[in-house]
Image (cartoon, rainbow, N blue to C red):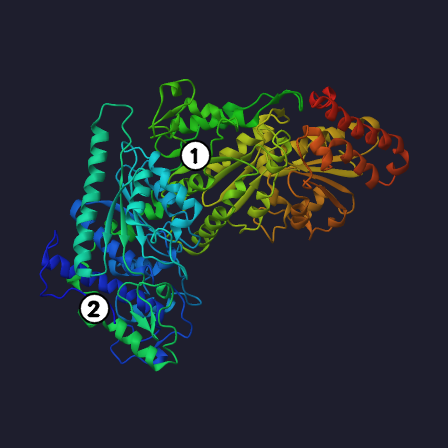
Amino acid sequence: MPTTRPEKTKKTSGILSEDELRKMDAYWRACNYLCVGMLYLQENPLLRQPLKPEHIKNRLLGHWGSDPGQSFTWVHLNRLIKKYDLNLIFLSGPGHGAPATLSNSYLEGVYSEIYPDKSEDEEGMKKFFKQFSFPGGIGSHCTPETPGSIHEGGELGYSLSHGFGAAFDNPDLIVTVVVGDGEAETGPLATSWHSNKFIDPVRDGAVLPVLHLNGYKIANPTILARISPEELEALFRGYGWTPYVVEGDDPHLMHQKMAEVTEKCIQEIRDIQSKARSSKSKSPERPRWPMIILRTPKGWTGPKEVDGHKVEGFWRAHQIPILDPKSNPKHLKQVEAWMKSYKPDELFDKSGRFIEELRELAPKGKKRITANPHANGGLLRKPLDLPDFRKYAVEVKKPGQIEISPTYNLGGFLRDVMRRNMTSFRVFGPDETASNRLQVVYEASPKTWMAKILPEDADGTLIAPDGRVMEMLSEHTLEGWFEGYVLTGRHGFFSSYEAFVHIIDSMFNQHAKWLEKSKLELRWRAPISSINLLITSLVWRQDHNGFTHQDPGFVDVVANKSPHVTRIYLPPDANCLLSVTDHCLRSENYVNVIIADKAPHLQYLKMEDAINHCTKGIGIWDWASTDAGVEPDVVMACAGDIPTAEALAATAILREHCPNLKIRFVNVVDLFRLMPETEHPHGLSEREFDALFTLDKPVIFNFHAYASLIHKFTYRRRNHNNIHVRGYKERGNINTPLELAILNQIDRYDLAIDVIDRVPRLQATAAHLKEWLKNEIIESINFAHQNGIDREEVTNWKWPF
């Protein structure tokens, strides 16, 4: 039988009055009733008829175990929102406990406002139950369809970092994050406890974590539930938190404990903020923020046993506790008894509407947790105040003559973006902002740091409590902060080494799925700022770090996601990088991936030419081509700054030694332009593609990443058989830049040889040139191995025409 609930006559001691306790427990019972209904019922939602097999869904999906604890927390948050007029949102870390969020949204009236067919009556409740984990309905996690959610929780580990991202620059917001004890075993979650060293009580909001210690995962105990209470509390004190424990299974006692602890936590948060905001010190002492450890049985208030097996307080409560009510009469009766134990007749009126006495416990209007606009951040989003990126242009008098670092130049633009948006824009990077040559942003703001600051840090460490550059050596935590920040209406820019952006592959996947669902299916979700990822320290300049740092495969991960939410840009020079970045910072509902190296590189395009080129996304560089007015013999194509430089050098060799060869030079900035327009909104039509790449001429394509991606994008094109792609082949070590290019055959010499082999009339007439090119390859490698650097004619090469 379910756990005993408070009787109306039972006396209580605590901060809740008898009447408050009765109502709050009734509200919680209503939440739990709705949670169970979502798992099982497709008919008879209020059990006003005896429960029959046909009332049960044919396929039972969903999770029960964490629902009661989450709803229990929610009811107590409602009380505090009303008492203190709080601005508060709720993140469900164990997102498979979505019934808790959904049930509260329904009881608040928000769900019916957004989805009028799920009305607040018996018919609406029936539809509300049936749609859960049902074809044509909604998923079993806190999906984008869920009002009040900014965190789906399908993939575990990101709830706390999302919560901190939401709190940054939101001084009046409290973000309550329920962390599952299974989720707490993931690497990203374990690291994100350190986020309390980065939140400034003066200008940021607060995060109140609730570690939901119900003891079990799918079929195993959780680590934190099986260590001693002393060790558990020491762990979180060591992380810098002040933990408060609420433990038990008697609802009567637990409501009073939870009311007392949540009240204390809110008071501590307010005291911390008040002290910091009234202090004249520019270096406030790092506070110990409160957190709650909520230890309750898994599947609390559910069946204690099913078929002789323990359920409540055990792993069997994780998903569907009673497995076969459709065909097992005993199970059917057990489900009915379980649901009736919540006394639905006391909770809902004759029409099926939640009774008014209990509705009064929820906040009103936008104070309702699932109506809070921070959980629909696009409603709060304001466009960035951007400086004119043209003012940061590199002066290019002639293509291919001067070298600068594209990312260093970009840093000046980002610095001024930050200066003009000091409450809504942050830069993120895993201890790599300076390494990626973006250090000019520190002129606008230092790095955020609430931990200890030493005297020697004044000599260039550039850390401060009120910094706006977010650096921590955890890509997971940074990406979580970034996502939480944009999901609540703000803007940002993230830079990462190319090889290690793979650490957030699955986080990118999850966010892209969230965006796709929100953008294509949910008109009520307002557009949010794009996630802008600068991928730098690229494979072709990781010759000094070696093989482990050479992996351009993130672009393949991005290319697999929906064309409605992903964009990939490979600007060939600094002016193109500025143009692309300005475009990305203005965009909404995308993940923009910008691939640009940090080392000094040749510059090719004047700013106006760069703008035109980036606007088109792909184009012929007339100044590098020799086919004006005639049909080309070969198309030399490229995407990526270093492959572009090598393709230009190969073109120069061919122009010098084969002056009659007609070469068309095509550069690609927007990689999705290569796809057919039927497959991607940025794709080229057949006519446009053929006009660039011809119907039958050889195309030598020098690509930044793995060659297979270009073939994937172009396999439907009529000239695909003549497209020959060079890219990274997993060949590398400690090399010189040219040696690394040679090993993977993206170098100028191999490209020129490829042209000779593909253009029939050159196969005989350019035989001597081909031999010279082979010798150049050998000499280049020998020189690198003897001297540790590339030859001067390579490192100082300039465009000669």
Residue 119 seen in this snapshot? no
Amino acid type, residue under disc 1 in the picture: Met
Which residue in the structure is indicated by mark 1? 472
Q: Which mark is residue 38?
A: none
Q: Residue at x 57, y 43 (%)?
A: 554
Residue closer to the observer: 506 or 520: 506
| Disc number lying in front (1 or 2) | 1
Graded by Cα atoms within 10 Å as few (under 14), some (14 to 19) or many (20 or more), the crowding at tag 1 reads some
Q: Position of residue 267 (x, y in %)?
A: 18, 41
Q: Position of residue 482 (x, y in %)?
A: 42, 40
Graded by Cα atoms within 10 Å as few (under 14), some (14 to 19) or many (20 or more), the crowding at tag 2 reads some
Which residue in the structure is indicated by mark 2? 348
Amino acid type, residue under disc 2 in the picture: Phe
Location of residue 55 with respect to 315 vertically, above or below: below
The quadrant where residue 394 appears:
top right
Q: Is residue 545 left or right of residue 326?
A: right
Do residues under tags 1 and 2 come within 8 Å of each other at their CB atoms?
A: no
